[in-house]
Image (tube, helix red, strand yellow):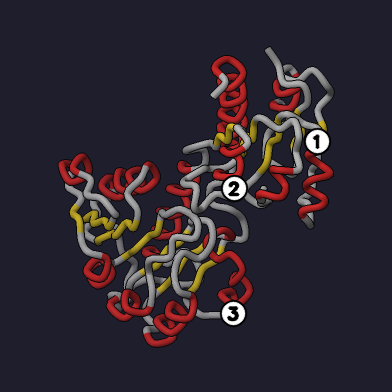
Amino acid sequence: MKFQKITMIDACRLTENAIPEIQKLSNDPLKLYWSYPSSEEEVIERVGDSDCVLVSFQTRLTPRIINAAPNLKYIGMCCSLFSEETSSVDIPASRERGIVVKGVKDYGDEGVVEFIFSQLINLGKGYGKYQWKEEPCELGGKSIGIIGMGTLGKMVAVAARSFGMKVYYYSKTRKPDEEAKGSKFLPLKDLMATCDAVTIHLPRYTVLVNEEEFACKKKNSVFINTSFGPLFDKEAFVKSMNADKTSFAFFDADGAGVYYKEFSEMENIVLYDKSAGFTRESKERLSQKAIENMISFLKEGK
């Protein structure tokens, strides 16, 4: 069984080798777009009469777009699908039409973990522009606070323990498996006040760190965000950094988001102009999992 017509409606960050594999799943030749549409009308035109579309997190599929696609039965998100509330695809509108939406999990986590600890090591040793302490230091014995203990948060915890760091976390639900390994739960304000480094791993639009939390933040600490978009109050963050010149922050392009230029003009902030999780290897994992999702749908219809 195959799809009749598959359209990749924007630059989904798939590998070149994935394209012929996807073509095998379509009766008609693939329609491939390597740019991002600028309007709903352009998205509707690109989707056309396709029964399957592939889309990245950068293009929103609104109810209007979904209802304008007469043949659509499958939406393959070439990105993570954390929840209906944070999805770039309108899940309720898709459900009403009987359209199946699938996302890809855990494809860029390895690169993010490497980014976090490479930056902490650089800062501790003073390899770059800044040095954390008066003398070069090691990570062992320092504390890291993880906000969001999902798959990626747990990978960060494993790496932190391998360096001899003390691991604390905040999550909506307690994680007994992590606590059995030595991670300790703290309320969010206590975590901010306790930890030498704090890193956020939450779904997009989940803003938990606000002015009250930044007011509690430990001095001479490091704040890290690699999630999609600044998942913190920007004004409160800037106020905190200006008040404590001994602290530092690390963001990749995703974590800084629309504030990248503003943050680049501030002291003690280190920016990476790419996505920390977007590597050659992550593209391969993303591509393979996106194809597996399509094959699963064709076989099982869900």
Nearest to the observer: residue 84 or residue 211:
84
User: Which mark is on residue 90?
Assistant: 2
Which corner quadrant holds the N terminus?
Answer: top right
Helix, strand or loop status at disc 1: strand
Q: Local crowd at mark 1 within 10 Å, few (<14), some, or many (≥20)?
A: some
Q: In this view, does 65 lie to the left or right of 301?
A: right
Which corner quadrant holds the C terminus?
Answer: top right
Quarter of the rendering containing residue 279: top right
* Residue that label 3 marks: 265
- Inspect the image, locate mark 3, and give the three-letter code of the amino acid beneath it: Glu
Nearest to the observer: residue 234 or residue 118:
234
- Inspect the image, locate mark 1, and give the three-letter code of the amino acid beneath it: Leu
Q: Position of residue 31 (x, y in %)?
A: 82, 32
Residue with the most extreme top position = 1
Question: Residues under labels 3 and 1: Cα distance?
Answer: 38 Å
User: Which mark is on residue 32?
Assistant: 1
Instruction: Looking at the image, tell me whether mark 3 or mark 2 is earlier in sequence order.
Output: 2
Mark 3, mark 1: which one is toward the viewer?
A: 1
Badge 3 vs badge 2, beta-carbon distance below 8 Å: no
Residue with the most extreme front position = 96
Instruction: Looking at the image, tell me whether mark 1 or mark 2 is earlier in sequence order.
Output: 1
Question: Residues under labels 3 and 2: Cα distance?
Answer: 36 Å
Q: Local crowd at mark 2 within 10 Å, few (<14), some, or many (≥20)?
A: some
Q: In this view, does 215 lie to the left or right of 43?
A: left
Q: Position of residue 179 (x, y in %)?
A: 17, 46
Mark 1, mark 2: which one is toward the viewer?
A: 2
Residue ID at (60%, 44%): 93
Residue ID at (67%, 41%): 55
Residue ID at (55%, 66%): 256
